[in-house]
Image: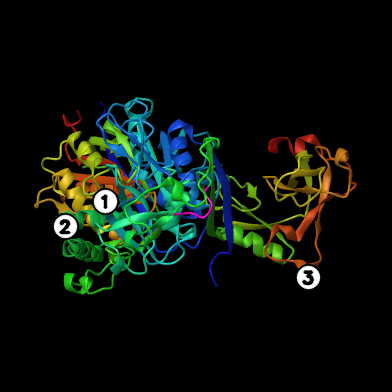
Amino acid sequence: MSRTLSAPVTVAFDYTRSTGPVLGRFFTGLRDGVVVGGRTASGRVVVPPPEFDPETHQAITDFVEVADTGVVTSWTWVPEPVAGQPLDRPFAFVLVTLDGADASFLHALDVGSPDEVSTGMRVRVRWAGERVGAITDIGCFEPEARGFVTGARAPSSTAGATSPTAEPVTGIVTPVSLDYVYAASPEETAFYRGLEQGRILGQRCPTCHKVYVPPRSACPTDGTPTTDEVELSESGTVTTFCVVNVPFLGQRITPPYVSAYVLLDGADIAFLHLILDCPAEDVHMGMRVKAVWRPREEWGTTIENISHFAPTGEPDADYDTYKQHL
Amino acid sequence: MRDVAVVGFAQRQMLEFDGSPTCVELLVPLFEECYAQTGWTRRDVGFWCSGSSDYLAGRSFSFVQAVDAIGVIPPVNESHVEMDLAWAMYEAWLKIQTGEVDTALVYAFGKSSAGTLRRTLSMQLEPYTMTPLWPDTVSLAGLQARAGIDAGLWDEAAMAQVVQRSLTDAEGNDHAVRSGGSSVEALLAKPMYADPLRKHDCAPVTDGAAAIVLAAGDRARGVRDRPAWISGLSHFIDPMSMGTRDLTRSASAARAAAGVDLTGVEVAELHAPFSHQELVLRRELGLGGDVRVNPSGGALAGNPMFSAGGIRIGEAATRIWSGEVDKALGHATSGPALQQNLLCVLDADAFGKVA
Ligand SMILES: [Zn+2]
């Protein structure tokens, strides 16, 4: 058995970015089936157009249409594509200098094996079926000979070309999704394994004797590894709280509800959980609460074994007992 | 300029760290080693700086939790860079130059194995025209390797020679996660992976952490008989797009080299995660055949993300401390295909070397 608990987790977010006038011009071109480069002060045509001239630092304002055919200047084989790459089967990443351009740019080339790609080979753009104004409007490159028209670029011939009266592209959405195997620390692992047995475990710092729950790998006060296991009471005191009124993505409970810091008896740090079984407006600092566990057959190595905390009906805790923990 | 030296260094490298992505468990013993080397307690540290990446950890503000390993009562002077340890060290060096502090402990950590490293690193690319294609680190290095092969600057045999020497040297490094150089012929007989790269041309995915201790003037002399004085520190950056750079060169490495004095360097620890990149760097830095490169085995023997560049500086420093050499170079890189390069020249002699 692994020393620690682990679980898969995916972190995903759609980044929305404004393009500005230069990349906006480039993406507008792609949407309309045309590749646009920028001319630098030295006369070089660069694709994608840089926003500022790397030598003069002036804004690039001179745009040039280049061909959707070109030549491979470097390549590498991708035997095991990863998620999000332009092709989901082995392919080549290539640097391509398009006809009419003086610098190469990066994209994918759809060929079946490394034997079918070479530096200097002629390639052409394979446009994506649906174009939105993004680098992925170029689906990939393909060997030029494979195309049904060679050596000719005619935007009017590109399927689904958007009317030139369409609005220019001013923004892009870039989805990012990363997969991880998330591992708990050994101390967190002990905590989750404790929850599986219906116990709330913390650890005591051997230097300052503070008790942390969930336990941490080191005491944040003095940096000492926490070593001594401590079983904590399932009763505690609300130190602070908030009433959640705002709906958000992934929310599991209908607002309004209360999220609170609960200082368990015997602990020196509060932890976050839900307060239910009473009206939200009744929750207050100093309120005494107790863990409400889910049915035992539903328990796993998760804090969700504790459904929520509920008021015990005891008198409020004295302010002095929790004022250090606000 | 104040005389500042590297006086402490500790590292861990492993293929897979069985622990949390904040690596607190890994950092605590590293700091203990640094305290043992210096005779200090945490209160002797004037400034803390860390390097790491939230994308590697898969969680936000991962560096904040790592601060647990320091202990922050009384409050500490702390900073973070989303960069390699070497750049965290650069910030600490600057902090000492301000005169505000005399000592610093810099550390870095990363659990590369938590995700798919070569994919995760796409997040450091230009987000409009590169990241959406998810070009992975190995592919970007492959484009660079091919460019040099096509230009006749190196060939597969030259790349295999780098691997053979690195992995043979790594046999003497307890921290290496890969070693055993075999022969150039045997390496060339291995199958191609990401043509033109074989697997041994690529640094292994490595988890780990490292820490470096800096001290100024007499504080450094109080720790070691032969502190590794920083006599030159320089870093530059190339454009991010692959198409507008000459991939067979590294203009930023050459520029960084022009900013320091490399004459007399006996040992160079170069951060080259792909075999051909050592060849690029040797040329750009103008290192002669008498300079011993990567006696630790270098990044091909272990490349813990966000620590591996700083480890090059630490490895170089240990050879000054031991008296083995009088002048050594540590190099760190970041970004695709040697985009960013930092040089740290270490000298046994403190005086009159810092420009
Ligand atoms: Zn403590």
Q: What amino acid type should be assigned to the residue bearing mark 2? A: Trp
Q: Position of residue B342 (x, y in %)?
A: 28, 41
Q: Quadrant of the C terminus of chain B?
A: top left
Task: Please give the range of residues in magenta.
Answer: A127-131
Q: Is residue B354 above or below residue A141?
A: above
Q: Amino acid at mark 3?
A: Glu
Give the CA distance from mark 1 to mark 3: 54 Å
Q: Which residue is mark 2?
A: B154
Would residue A74 be visible to someone looking at this image?
yes
Q: Which residue is mark 1?
A: B315
In the rendered image of this protein, does residue B308 appear above or below residue A240? below
- Can residue A220 be seen at all in this image of the molecule? no
Residue B234 forms part of the magenta stretch: no
Q: Which residue is mark 3?
A: A297
Examine the image and state in which quarter residue A320 appears.
top right
Q: Which label is found at residue A320? A: none
Query: Number of numbered discs present?
Result: 3
At label 1, the amino acid type is Glu
Residue A143, x across and y down, in percent: 34, 61
Residue A129 shown in magenta: yes
Which is the main secondary structure of the residues drawn in magenta? loop
Residue drawn at x 38%, y 25% is B100
Query: Quick one: SS at disc 2?
Result: loop
The residue under the point 46% across, 31% down is A21
Q: CA distance from mark 2 to mark 3?
A: 64 Å
> Are the residues under badges 2 and 3 in a single subunit?
no
